[in-house]
Image (cartoon, coloured by chain):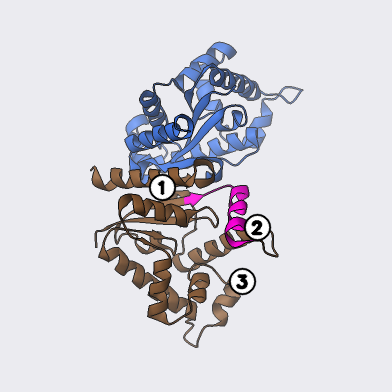
Chain colours: A blue, B brown
């Protein structure tokens, strides 16, 4: 496999998904995010909600206790099965041709298996809070608490399955502040980096 | 003061200084790094070596003990004086017109005082080690040990004078991996971000 893949990791509410889609449009590539969930739904028979929630986030409550609570006698959980299928689907998609993959530990899964441009998208708390309220509405918990919770669970999930700390800048080619730069600028920069890395050398 | 300034913070050996210079050439701006040392030499009468070493790095040994050991009865040290003059010189340079400033806590000093594009340059340990051996030669300590030591002292210095943790990506507009992207690409990206942020809006 030697296809050129852009992976986008992102803080919750930073607009990474939108930036991934915009980048893909600019480069004429497919972007896998919702499509990935569809493929996983098809492959596992699990519900879209379960996949969206458990394919990227550690469970609510104590991650370690819940990670083990639904394990069978072999120590294997439904979430572990989902991880294995997710890994397989990501490898297949990356094998099909150049694309953009948002989230789901694709940066780690494709390490050494495809030519990747790994990007991390982040933003300040105030802009992310505003964005998730606009997008998902008001909830019981404050948007700041929801953001902290989501980031924490995403980091725990990533670390549990990869052994690597999530969001450490040294693991990416570049990290872009979507709140300060704007989403369109981020997409333009990523597309430019893709051209520089893969098309001009 | 409303000039548009690029500040470049960098891991030791990541080529941040070279990238700063290349960016400045691309944009036709002055770049302050060695020039800043000259100005500080003139203003303080301190040696070039002292300024280079103590204007960005915590002292060898225990930072806290040495930070206090050369203090007079008012608790003020030579390094504190250097910090004050350095801060003043950076504010003056930023007041003179658009420029690139490498290191020396300029991102923090200019916060709220100029329109800044704050960039963090980093790279993997192996590439940085190769670079410092090419640039500064072989020493008694391994290049990896020298890098860890320099980064640690730079972080300690930054935190001591600003109260802010150094190298936390959320404090920058963008972070670029010079080892993975190449220094020319980093300079091009920064110049493009400058144009997008300041010249196209």
Q: Is residue B127 magenta?
A: yes
Vertical order, B102 against A161 (above or below): below
Q: Does the magenta stretch include residue A75?
A: no
Marks 1/3 same chain: yes
Q: Earlier in the sequence, mark 1 or mark 3?
A: 3
Vertical order, A70 against B145 (above or below): above
Q: Name the residue under label 2.
A: B143
| Residue A73, visible in the rendered structure | yes
Q: Can you tell which of label 2 and label 3 is closer to the viewer?
A: 2
Q: Which of marks 1 and 2 is nearer the N terminus?
A: 2
Q: Which residue is drawn at 41% across and 55% down?
A: B20
Q: In the figure, residue A45 lies in which quadrant?
A: top right
The chain to which mark 2 is attached is B
Element type at mark 3: loop
Q: Which residue is drawn at 55% across and 48% down?
A: B123
Vertical order, B55 against A23 (above or below): below
Instruction: State the mark number for residue A71.
Output: none
Task: Give the class, few, some or many, for how many residues have Cα within 10 Å of label 3's Cα (few <14, many ≥20).
Answer: few
Residue B166 on image: x %, y %: 49, 58
Q: Is residue B156 left or right of residue B197?
A: right
Tag 1 and tag 2, C-beta contact below 8 Å: no
Q: Residue at x 70, y 25 (%)?
A: A71
Q: Mark 1 points at which residue?
A: B187
Residue A156 on image: x %, y %: 59, 38
- Magenta-tinted stretch: B121-137
């Amino acid at each position: 496999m030697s296809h050129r893949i852009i992976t986008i990791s992102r803080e919750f509410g930073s607009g990474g998904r939108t930036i991934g889609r915009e980048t893909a449009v600019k480069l004429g590539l497919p972007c896998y995010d919702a499509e990935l969930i569809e493929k996983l739904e098809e492959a596992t028979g699990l519900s879209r909600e379960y996949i969206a929630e458990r394919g990227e986030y550690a469970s609510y409550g104590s991650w370690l206790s819940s990670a083990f609570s639904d394990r069978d006698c072999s120590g294997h959980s439904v979430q572990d099965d989902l991880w294995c299928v997710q890994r397989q689907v990501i490898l297949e998609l990356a094998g099909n041709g150049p694309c953009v993959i948002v989230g789901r530990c694709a940066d780690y899964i494709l390490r050494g298996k495809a030519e990747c441009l790994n990007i991390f998208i982040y933003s300040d708390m105030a802009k992310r809070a505003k964005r998730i309220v606009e997008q998902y509405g008001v909830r019981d918990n404050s948007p700041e608490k929801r953001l902290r919770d989501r980031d924490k669970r995403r980091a725990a999930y990533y670390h549990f399955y990869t052994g690597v700390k999530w969001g450490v800048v040294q693991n990416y080619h570049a990290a872009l502040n979507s709140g300060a730069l704007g989403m369109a600028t981020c997409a333009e920069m990523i597309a430019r980096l893709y051209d520089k890395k893969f098309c001009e050398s």
